[in-house]
Image (cartoon, coloured by chain):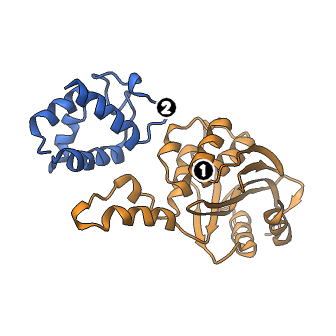
Chain colours: A blue, B orange
């Protein structure tokens, strides 16, 4: 699980061009949206594509994204339970 | 009624050099546009995290506009009626190609939302407007080459008809590692007359 969290932090920084963040800056329970990393709606769509492309998880309900993308810890747990690749 | 208007300031970004009113602010010899613009933004205190999420055309347009608008000492607390009149040759072709690469393989079909949103050149105007609180007229024209007369006529129309207090005009062209930005701010104060001869002279200056 800790490897997956590390992988997610690295991927999110690169994928979303978070120039001002390093892996060490992101705590597992930090909010990804709002006051945390400050991600926006386009970032949310990009994360949905990442789930499909990297882990074989297709989100069909946008409301699901709101729950899953709360933090790295929540996202990693969801991926562990639902990944198909 | 025709009003006097002047070119208050101008910014050029080309050949590894960022300059304001003819004075170099930053230079970097790298042939890679992405590395060049990233360094320029950091050194010129852009301080805007969203800058790094933009496509290359928007980064080029945003940096040139940001330099001019910060130099104009506008209040960040209120809206400004500064119309944007931009133009280029390559439209958003650079990003269009990158988007196409994400959808050309049916077995690896993952269109990127953050690329797709930049597949229009006028998105760069939106980025500038968000940062500088501009709720003003804006247009992005596509021409074969720099067209001083068209920019001048449109700018004069907006200023003479009180559609804008100032206009930010120019040329922002990018395709892969070829890039060229020339933006100028037109208003009621200044020493350079706002006419096609002066616009062309500044555009052609090194």
Left or right for A55, reference B71: left
Could you tell me which secondary element the residue under label 2 belongs to? loop
Residue B144, above or below A40: below
Looking at the picture, tell me which residue is in the foreground, B157 or A20: A20
Q: Position of residue B133 (x, y in %)?
A: 57, 45
Residue A57, above or below B6: above
Residue at position x 81%, y 58% from top? B7
Asked if residue B41 can be seen in this view, the reply is: yes
Looking at the picture, tell me which residue is in the foreground, B166 or B151: B151
Q: Position of residue B192 (x, y in %)?
A: 88, 58
Chain ID, mark 1: B
Q: Which residue has dot 2 on it? A: A20
Looking at the picture, tell me which residue is in the foreground, B189 or A42: A42
Foreground label between 1 and 2 = 2
Where residue A23 sits, quadrant-wise, is top left
Asked if residue A71 can be seen in this view, the reply is: no
Residue at position x 33%, y 33% from top? A33
Chain ID, mark 2: A
Q: Position of residue A25 (x, y in %)?
A: 41, 23
Q: Which residue has dot 1 on it? A: B62
Left or right for B10, reference A21: right
Could you tell me which secondary element the residue under label 1 belongs to? helix
Residue A42, above or below B202: above
Residue at position x 50%, y 68% from top? B93
């Amino acid at each position: 699980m800790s490897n997956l969290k590390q992988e997610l932090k690295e991927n999110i920084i690169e994928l979303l061009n978070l120039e001002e963040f390093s892996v060490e800056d992101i705590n597992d329970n930090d909010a990804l949206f709002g006051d945390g990393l400050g991600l926006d709606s386009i970032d949310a769509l990009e994360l949905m594509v990442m789930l499909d492309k990297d882990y074989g998880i297709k989100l069909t309900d946008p409301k699901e994204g709101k729950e899953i993308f709360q933090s790295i810890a929540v996202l990693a747990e969801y991926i562990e339970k639902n990944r198909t690749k | 009624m025709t009003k006097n208007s002047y070119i208050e300031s101008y910014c050029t970004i080309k050949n590894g050099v960022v300059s304001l009113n003819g004075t170099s602010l930053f230079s970097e010899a790298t042939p890679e546009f992405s590395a060049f613009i990233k360094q320029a933004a950091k050194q010129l205190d852009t301080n805007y995290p969203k800058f790094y999420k933009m496509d290359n055309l928007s980064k080029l347009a945003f940096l040139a506009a940001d330099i001019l608008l910060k130099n104009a000492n506008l209040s960040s607390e209120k809206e400004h009626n500064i119309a944007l009149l931009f133009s280029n040759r390559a439209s958003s072709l650079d990003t269009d190609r990158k988007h196409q690469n994400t959808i050309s393989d049916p077995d690896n079909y993952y269109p990127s939302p953050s690329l797709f949103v930049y597949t229009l050149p006028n998105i760069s105007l939106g980025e500038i407007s968000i940062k500088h609180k501009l709720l003003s007229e804006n247009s992005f024209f596509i021409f074969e080459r720099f067209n001083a007369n068209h920019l001048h006529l449109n700018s004069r129309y907006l200023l003479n008809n009180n559609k804008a207090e100032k206009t930010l005009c120019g040329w922002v062209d990018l395709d892969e590692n070829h890039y060229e930005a020339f933006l100028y701010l037109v208003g009621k104060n200044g020493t350079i007359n706002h006419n096609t001869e002066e616009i062309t002279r500044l555009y052609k200056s090194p």
